[in-house]
Image: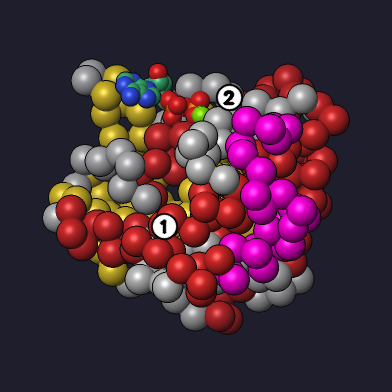
Amino acid sequence: MKDLRANGNPIIRIRNLGKRFGTNRVLNGIDFDVFPGQVVVIIGPSGSGKSTFLRCCNGLEQAEEGDIEICGSALVNQGKMLPDVELNELRKNVGMVFQSFNLFPHLSVLDNICVAPQMLRNLKKTEARAQAVKLLGKVGLAAKAEAMPNSLSGGQKQRVAIARALAMEPLVMLFDEPTSALDPELVGEVLRVMKILAQDGMTMIVVTHEMAFAQEVADVVVVMDGGVIIEAGPPATIFGAPREERTKTFLQSVL
Ligand code: ADP
Ligand code: MG
């Protein structure tokens, strides 16, 4: 197995992360590091805080306790979030893909991918288009550059969303149940693209119920329940010899 820690400092470092919605304590005392090139898969029952955790990692939700560092820069420092200007800078390093694709419906596939790099990375239009064409090739959609989103299948939309996130050249990609909204026959094409990304060395945190993907691609599987990490380890351990009763119960419900 590759020694990920040998690569140096974590891309994401989280200490004692806490988050409440009103009186509902949703994340509690989360400690976690994600190292360069690592694929972390987060599993756990619905409502356990997985999405909130991911959203805290790119500042979409405000954490109230603890620290989050992205590549050594504080996104959250003792429960205090960066000011907006700096937050936006830091966020460029963190790509996110949602369950619901969130493409711009009035823009072509190519323009969906070009908007952010032109606005936020100051790429010229020709540069942004050249990069978008390359990324579309990577996700297997070179032929769809001029298509409008509503003419695509869900699997194609999600692959465009992945290309769009990659166009910002992020240091880490967050995926929140990227295949949960797809018809079963379209899940594989999206997972295949994610697997290629992982093989290319992209650092990834993936929330998913696709246990076969977790077994095959994850370096670390994190099990969440009730807003805490109940255990984490290599897939062989989590799936083969889980330590916690709650992990066993959860796995029985999904496998
Ligand atoms: P998961 O992704 O594991 O299903 P979530 O992070 O979506 O879990 O939710 C964790 C808890 O936080 C749930 O109890 C949910 O109801 C609550 N929650 C999530 N988002 C909000 C919100 N915007 N406002 C209030 N409560 C929320
Ligand atoms: Mg969720």
Q: Is mark 2 within 8 Å of ligand 1?
A: yes
State the SS at label 1.
helix
- Residue 11: x and y in percent read 45, 67
Could you tell which of marks 2 and 1 lies nearer the N-terminus? 2
Quadrant placement of the N terminus = bottom right
User: Which residue has dot 1 on it?
Assistant: 116
Q: Please state the extent of the stretch shown in magenta in the rendering.
A: 130-154
**Residue type, mark 1 in image:** Ala
- Label for residue 45? 2
Q: 86 and 63: which one is in front?
A: 86
Rendering quadrant holding ligand 1: top left
State the SS at label 2.
loop
Q: CA distance from mark 2 to mark 1?
A: 34 Å
- Label for residue 159? none
- Residue 204: x and y in percent read 58, 57
Residue shown at the point (55%, 22%) measured from the top left: 46
Tell me the crowding category of disc 1: few under 14, some 14 to 19, or many 20 or more residues within 10 angstroms, Cα based: some
Mark 2 touches mark 1? (CB < 8 Å): no
